[in-house]
Image (spheres, grey):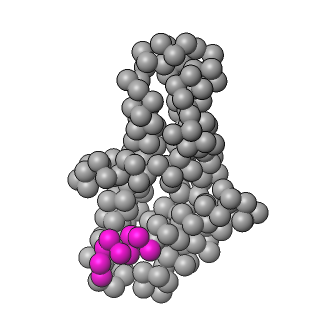
Amino acid sequence: MSLAAAPRDTRARIEAAALALFAERGVDGVSVRDIAQRVGVTEGALYRHFPSKDGLARALFLSRYGRLAREIEAIRAERADFPGRLEALVRMFAEAFDEDPAGFAYVLVSQHEHLRDLEAASSDNAVEALGRVFSDAMASGEIPQGDVAFVTALALGLVVQPAIFRIYGRLDRPPSAYAAEITTAIRRAVGAE
């Protein structure tokens, strides 16, 4: 599952250029002019699609983060068993990184700017969607009862940290190469084994 939009129109080209620049330099290190030059449009053209650079940054985050939430919910709907859900979730996260490392990196580094404004009840909240997977597993007795937020944090750490290590060159292989090990580590961490 790619977190990226297909660059087929000006808006998508703006998003792709901004994402690459934001992932490379951070939002604060990129100007509207930088984005417009990368796309080959005027700054005015950029403002026809987004109200501001911050609005563009937020739209990029929310579209990718919301896509993750929808993918998590789709897996939750398709699989009733915790082991199957967990395996599919880890594979989905790993493939999302493999297919769109810049988008995945952007979600990771920009989440602190945007998550505080995202309501927990939002259908686009990936952390809450993942928490529901663990809550379901607790309710069905597949994992021990516990603090759902803490268990979700443990699992996310085990999924995200290998991606971060890959971004910074500490791992030679992509996260998908470690999917089985990540799945086993999460099962152990949440008491499913």
Query: Residue, x 33% and y 65% (percent of image)?
Result: 131
Specify start and end residues of the magenta stretch as a single range.
Answer: 146-154
Query: Residue, x 46% and y 71% (percent of image)?
Result: 155
Q: On screen, 139 above or below 73?
A: below
Query: Residue, x 61% and y 42% (percent of image)?
Result: 25
- Residue 152 is covered by the magenta coloring: yes
Q: Does the magenta stretch mainly form a helix, a strand or a loop?
A: helix
Residue 12 in sight from this viewpoint: no
Residue 178, how many percent across, how many down? 65, 68
Q: Report the label total.
A: 0
Residue 58 in sight from this viewpoint: yes
Q: On screen, 78 above or below 17?
A: below
| Residue closest to the eye, 153 or 193 | 153
Residue 55, how many percent across, how many down? 39, 32
Question: Looking at the rendering, which quadrant does residue 100 occupy?
Answer: top right
Query: Residue, x 35% and y 75% (percent of image)?
Result: 150
Q: On screen, 8 above or below 94?
A: above
Residue 7, how many percent across, how many down? 58, 26
For residue 136, side relative to residue 85 (left or right): left
- Residue 151 is covered by the magenta coloring: yes
